[in-house]
Image: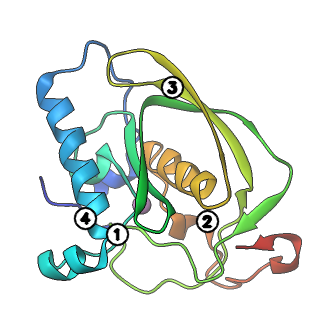
Amino acid sequence: MKDILDEKEKILREKSLDVTFPISEERKKLVQDIIEFLTDSQIEELAEKYDLRPGMGLAAIQLGIKERFFVVVHEYEEGKFDNYVIFNPKLVSNSEEMIYVGEGEGCLSVNREVCGIVPRYARVTVEGYDQDGNKIRIRAREELAIAFQHELDHLDGILFTDRIDPKNPYKNKDLYREI
Ligand code: NI
């Protein structure tokens, strides 16, 4: 797999472009590589063996590919993973309730400690396409909902750090539920 870009790379600030179908075999292979990478990174022994930082999601732009798709590998139960690969994703509905990750959000492109609250919707519905061009609609809650919103942001050139007020990183903490 290509190297993951660090936040200093300006391309991470650019808006990715819609993907047109059919997608190439090369892209499908890349998607498989990303799934494998994200899964391994969340399995402690493998993460240690290959020196991987644990990560749940990756957007194409983080590999320097300006295309609107992302991959999320969610450990829904100890040692059990679900993969989500969404092309041209759109957030179509969201809860009013907002949540945040108590220990702070992380990103494979942000290689430093960043403290603060990133308010996210507790539940979202995302529509998009699978790699064969079939329309898909996924409802997500809690951690998975946060991952989707984090990756959607990447497609618009936004990093989680942009959503934290450096002067007041815990602003309005009590308005949101910690997970
Ligand atoms: Ni990220």
Q: Is residue 29 above or below residue 53?
A: above
Residue position marked by numbered label 1 in the rendering: 42
Residue position marked by numbered label 4 in the rendering: 40
- Mark 3 residue element: strand
Q: Is residue 134 above or below residue 39?
A: above
Q: Is residue 56 left or right of residue 77?
A: left
Q: Nearer the viewer, mark 3 or mark 4?
A: 4
Mark 3: give few (<14), some (14-19) or many (20+) Cα within 10 Å.
Answer: many
Disc 4 and disc 1 in contact, CB within 8 angstroms: yes
Q: Quadrant of ligand 1?
A: bottom left
Q: Position of residue 52 (x, y in %)?
A: 22, 74
Q: Mark 3 or mark 1: which comes first in sequence?
A: 1
Res 28 quadrant in image: top left
Residue position marked by numbered label 3 in the rendering: 128
| Residue depicted at 39% across the width and 24% down the height | 18
Q: Nearer the viewer, residue 156 or 99?
A: 99
Q: Is residue 89 above or below residue 112?
A: above
- Mark 4 residue element: helix
Q: Position of residue 50 (x, y in %)?
A: 13, 75
Q: Nearer the viewer, residue 48 or 8?
A: 48
Tell me which amino acid carries mark 1.
Answer: Gln
Tell me which amino acid carries mark 3.
Answer: Gly
Q: Is residue 131 left or right of residue 158?
A: left
Calculate the distance from the C-alpha at mark 3 to the C-alpha at mark 1.
25 Å
- Mark 1 residue element: loop
| Residue depicted at 62% across the width and 52% down the height | 145
Residue position marked by numbered label 2 in the rendering: 163
Q: For the C terminus, which image quadrant?
A: bottom right
Q: Position of residue 78 (x, y in %)?
A: 47, 69
